[in-house]
Structures are given as structure tokens and as C-alpha cells.
Image: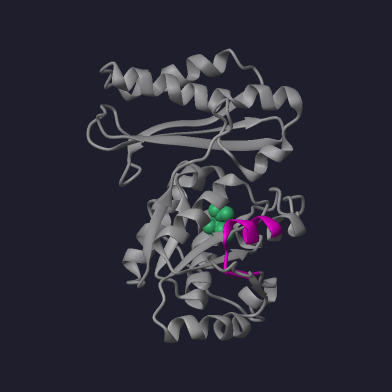
Amino acid sequence: MASARVMQRVRTVSALRRAMAPWRSQALRIGFVPTMGAIHDGHLSLVRRARRTCDRVVASLFVNPLQFGPTEDFARYPRPIHEDRAKFAGAGVDLLWEPAIAGIYPAGDRTRVHVSGLTDAFEGAARPGHFEGVTTVVLRLLNAVQPDELWLGQKDAQQAMVIERMVADLLLPVRVRRGATVRMRDGLALSSRNAYLGAGERAQAVALSLGLRAARAHLVAGERSAARIAAAVRGVWRRHPLVHEDYVAVVDAATMAPLRTVRGRVLVAVAARVGPARLIDNFEWSGR
Ligand code: PAF
């Protein structure tokens, strides 16, 4: 019978390093899943995937103030800490790191990480400063954990791309891996922000994935005009009046460059406001 693992919890970087020292001395492969909590099956699927490829899994739980704009939802971001801990433990996290804000941003902190170009459009345009907050915190988390693998969700495709760029540019010794988006039965992508939706809004939020499904059907049928693929998404959204478009992007999946004509690996990414929630979703397509 396999022995049950007990999840350790630490707060400081020094406690994190102490807890990981025996694993390092045994050269165990370490997987890392950074999160802001409000844990759902999307996060847990990353933990499970990391468990399959690594010997130990570290998760972090840190609602990063730097990646929220002044009018965004930092204060009301859901923080169900006890449920989160239980979910992490149940999914097989070995070590949960819950840093304090001062542990990540020490007094006098002046350093920011900016990935240019890739961060200008789409999420970057809608949320000025957001990606600088993400890359700044992720670099700090990586420096503390020093994992072999970093697991990120495909739902935040632009975030994954920006972090992959940072990791490559700064020669960080970590393999970035993406886990597939996990969805509700009707197709709605799991997101911590789904918790903001009222019943009517929840019913219409499915329009994001329905719109993407329509876009995919057009691609499969041979459509190559980015404008007509985007129009397929908007056609679905017109039937869902609570869904307000932020963007519908048909872009190169490696560079986020907007396309007129689809070729190679393409990312169709969407963002919309549904009631108090701003939701995103996407899919990648490479001609199959
Ligand atoms: O995707 C998230 O939850 C956050 O942006 C991340 C990567 C944990 C950084 O705070």
C-alpha cells in the first residue's frame, strides 16, 4: 500500500528552503504550481499533472497585489483559505507555501520585471500593469522555489506566453508546462472569478465557450479569414445580451501577432464582461 503523504505548510522563504532541502539533496524532481487561491479543478488538474512528471509538488497561494489595477478586485478576490488547503492536500501537494506580502515585496522593494511587446495588447491593454505584476511575482516565486517544472494553465494563454518568454530570456533553469483548460459540463472554463456570477449571468457566461466552439467549427470547415472567424464568435455573443465584448483575438499562437489570414498555429482568445466578472477563454488550433 502506498504511504499517504502529509502536506507541509510554510510561510517564509527560509522555511520553504528548509522544507525542500532534503528533496534537493536526493535530487528529486520538483514541480511547482503557483496560484492565487480560490482553488478549483483547473488548479488541481495542474497539481495532478505535476505529480505525474515530478517527485514532489510545491504549490503557492499568494493573492499578488501587484497584478491588480487600482479599480480591480484585489480586495474582494475570493480567499477561502481552509477549503483551498484541503483541496491542495487532497490533490497531493507536498508543500504549500503561503507567503505574506512582505515576504514577496520586502521593505524598500524597487525591482520590476517587464516583458515588452507581448504584454501590450489584449490582457495587457485591458489591464495596464497586470503582466508586470505577474512576471515580477512569478520570477520571485521561481527564485524561492527553484523548481524543475513550472505548471501553468492554458486558460491564461497570454500569461503563459509572457512567462515562457521571461523564462527563456532570463535563462531560468525551469521547464514551463501548460495544462489544458478545465471546463464545466456546459463548456464554461473554470475560473476563480466565476464565483462573481449571478444565476442569469452564469447561464449566459457559457457564450464564451460557445463562441469559441463556433470559431473552431469555421476553422475546421476551412475558413481562413480571421475577421470571419471573429464574426462567428460575435454571432453567438449577440444572442447573449449580458455578455459584453472586451476583445475577440485571432492571433499567431507563438507571438500574439494579429492575423488577417490563418496559417500555422493560431490562438483564438476572447475576453468579455459578464455582470461583475471579466472572463477570458481561448483555444489553440494548428490545422487539425
Ligand atoms: O494565474 C495566476 O493565478 C497568477 O497570475 C499567478 C501565475 C499565480 C501569479 O500571481
Foreground residue, 247 or 218? 218
**Residue interval drawn in magenta:** 86-97
Residue 51 in sight here = yes
Residue 89 among those drawn in magenta: yes
Foreground residue, 167 or 248? 167
The quadrant holding residue 62 is bottom right
Residue 81 is left or right of residue 122, and the answer is: right
Residue 34 among those drawn in magenta: no
The quadrant holding residue 89 is bottom right
In the rendered image, the vertical position of residue 12 relative to residue 195, given as above or below: below
Residue 254 is left or right of residue 155, and the answer is: left
Which residue is rendered at x = 50% and y = 36% of the image?
281
Q: Residue 106's spot in the image, x, y percent? A: 64, 79
**Which quadrant of the frame does ligand 1 lie within?**
bottom right
What's the colour scheme?
Answer: one colour
The residue furthest front is 1
Residue 120 in sight here = no
Q: Residue 107's spot in the image, x, y percent? A: 67, 81
In the rendered image, the vertical position of residue 107 relative to residue 232, given as above or below: below
Which residue is rendered at x = 37% and y = 68% of the image?
174
Work out which quarter of the rendered image holds the C terminus and state it: top left
Foreground residue, 209 or 15? 15
Which residue is rendered at x = 58% and y = 32% of the image?
184
